[in-house]
Structures are given as structure tokens and as C-alpha cells.
Amino acid sequence: KIPKKVLTLAFIRRDDQILLGRKKRGFGEGKWNGFGGKVDLDETISDAAVREVREECGLLVTNLKKLGVIDFEFVGDPVILNVHVFSTVDFTGNVTESEEMSPQWYKVHEVPFEKMWKDDPHWFPYMLDNKKFNAYFLFEGHEKIISHWIKEVESL
Ligand code: 6U4
Ligand code: NA
Ligand code: NA
């Protein structure tokens, strides 16, 4: 049996902008990304997505839409990261820096892919277009993709 670790990854949109955060510590440190993390035992995946956004950038999000599910595998590691990607335009509160993330609004055509995970340029176009997708990436280390697939789907 292959162990899967369920993670959330949420994006907040405003006009022609998207909120990203630079991760200050832990897995993916230094990379810009959406907000998210591990799902706790007593919560649903979308509850975890809401909680992680609040913890990491201070916003209270509603109407999260699930847009993608991505499995990540790393050569030599049996654990598969099962990342659930969400997006919303609905939020209240003010963007605040946390111990985990430095948040910043980016224009959607100025997303800093060179400072992000290498898989992001593959699936961001689907997410930015609100298209549902499934994807798989096999990494060697944290910077090299060995193989991948991605497909648009009707439902997740
Ligand atoms: P702790 O430190 O226990 O609070 P937690 O916040 O629960 O951790 P974290 O930060 O390790 O979890 O979650 C990792 C985040 O990175 C999730 O939002 C998923 C995201 N992520 C992991 N691999 C990714 C990849 N290859 N591309 C990507 N996001 C990735 O775009
Ligand atoms: Na996190
Ligand atoms: Na967490």
C-alpha cells in the first residue's frame, strides 16, 4: 500500500491579480505558491483549505472551488503527496504576513514561475482558466521533473 499525504493548496483571485506567498520555512521554503498544508484528522479537505489560508495570510475565504488534484512522487520516497487545488474570489479580512508566508498580489500574467515549483507552469493555465484538471508529477529532488501527465476533467 502506497502512503498518501493529503495537502491543500488554495489561490485567491482579485480582478486581474492572484495572491501568492513566499514560503518562509519548511517544505518548499523560498518558493512562491498558493496557501495550504496538511489536512487534520477531524476536518474535511475544504475545511483544511480555509484554515490554512487563514493561518498563512489572514484572509477568511468562502466559496472555494476545487479545481485540481495533483499527485506528486519523489524518486526514492514511497510517500505520494496528494494535493487538492482550490480557488476563490470571495474573501474578507486583510492580507497579513505570517510566520510561514510572505503574501503578495501578482498580476496573473506576471506570476513568478522561475521562483516557484517546477510543476506550476504546467497546471497554472488550467487553474487560472477555472478548468478542472488531474495531474501527476515525478520529481528527482525538488528541482527536476522526470515524468508527468496532466488532463482536463469534467469532475474531480
Ligand atoms: P506545517 O509546517 O506542519 O504547518 P503544513 O502547513 O501543514 O505544514 P506544508 O506547508 O508542508 O504543510 O504544505 C505544503 C504545501 O506545499 C501545500 O500547500 C502543498 C504545496 N506543495 C507541495 N508540493 C508542491 C508542488 N510540487 N507544487 C506546488 N505546491 C506544492 O505548487
Ligand atoms: Na502550510
Ligand atoms: Na498545517
Image: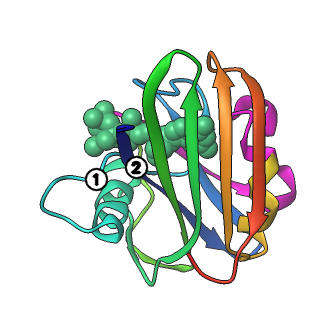
Task: Say which element carries label 1.
Answer: loop
5 versus 126 height, above or below: above
Asked if the residue under mark 1 is in contact with the one under mark 2, i.e. CB atoms within 8 Å, the reply is yes
- The segment highlighted magenta reads 98-121
Q: Residue 87: x and y, percent?
A: 56, 71
x 69%, y 67%: residue: 133
The mark that comes first in sequence, 2 or 1, is: 2
Q: Who is closer to the viewer here, 125 or 144? A: 144
Q: Is mark 2 within 8 Å of ligand 1?
A: yes
The quarter of the picture where residue 140 lies is top right
Quarter of the image that includes the C terminus: bottom right
Residue 39: numbered disc: 1
x 42%, y 50%: residue: 36
Q: Residue 90: x and y, percent?
A: 49, 82
Taking the magenta stretch, the answer to whether it contains residue 109 is: yes
Q: Residue 120: x and y, percent?
A: 73, 45
Residue 56: numbered disc: none
Q: Which residue is mark 2?
A: 7
Q: In the rendered view, does 126 fall on the left or right side of 22?
A: right
Q: Who is closer to the viewer here, 154 or 126? A: 154
Task: Say which element carries label 2.
Answer: strand
Q: Amino acid at mark 2?
A: Leu
x 35%, y 70%: residue: 46
64 versus 42 height, above or below: below
x 77%, y 26%: residue: 146
Tell which quarter ligand 2 is in.
top left
Q: Residue 137: x and y, percent?
A: 67, 39
Q: Amino acid at mark 1?
A: Val
